[in-house]
Amino acid sequence: MADKEKESSSSGLTWFLAGAVCGAVAALLYTPNTGAENRKLIGKKTDETRDALSDSGKEIVEKGKDLFDRGRQIAEEAADLFERGRKLARG
């Protein structure tokens, strides 16, 4: 069931991105700007998007490291509790 949901959301994202690209191309074709202005705008937006994606990626990596460290700590605590329980059971 989870595979179908993942596949469906991936397909939906693909179609959304394809629609966004088509919309952007149509907007550029019908804009009153010159080609040079459009190229400048595209370059500016590309740089902004690259920076935003880079920042988002860094945040995701940091959150992933935090979650990994927290998971490791929980696993160590669980191992300690298990060991104490085993010692208590043995008497």
Image: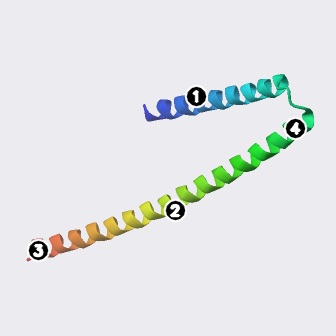
What's the residue type where badge 4 is placed? Answer: Glu
Query: Is mark 3 in CB contact (under 8 Å) with mark 1?
Result: no
Q: Quadrant of residue 83?
A: bottom left
Tell me which label, 3 or 1, sits earlier in the chain: 1
Foreground label between 1 and 2: 2
Farthest residue, direction front: 32
The residue that appears at 58% across and 59% down in the rendered structure is: 58
Q: Which mark is residue 88?
A: 3
Q: Which residue is mark 4?
A: 37
Foreground pick, 82 / 36: 36
Query: In the displayed structure, does residue 53 sit left or right of residue 35?
Result: left
Kindly report the distance in space between the C-alpha atoms of the residues bearing marks 3 and 1.
54 Å
According to the picture, the residue beneath numbered tag 2 turns out to be 62
The residue drawn where x is 51% and y is 62% is 62
Sequence-first tag of 4 and 2: 4
Residue at disc 3, secondary structure: helix
Q: Amino acid at mark 1?
A: Gly
Helix, strand or loop under label 2? helix
Which of the marked residues, 2 or 3, is nearer the chain's N terminus? 2
CA gap between label 1 and label 2 equals: 28 Å
User: Disc 2 vs disc 3: which is toward the camera?
Assistant: 2
Q: Are marks 2 and 3 in contact (CB under 8 Å)?
A: no
Q: Residues within 10 Å of mark 2 (few under 14, many from 20)?
A: few
Three-letter residue code for mark 2: Glu
Which numbered disc, 4 or 3, marks the residue closer to the eye? Answer: 4
| Residue 28, percent from left and from top | 81, 28
Q: Which residue is mark 1?
A: 12
- Which residue type carries mark 3? Leu
Q: Quadrant of residue 19?
A: top right
Whether residue 27 sits left or right of residue 5 in the image: it is right
Q: CA distance from mark 4 to mark 2?
A: 38 Å
**Which circle, 1 or 4, is nearer the viewer?**
4
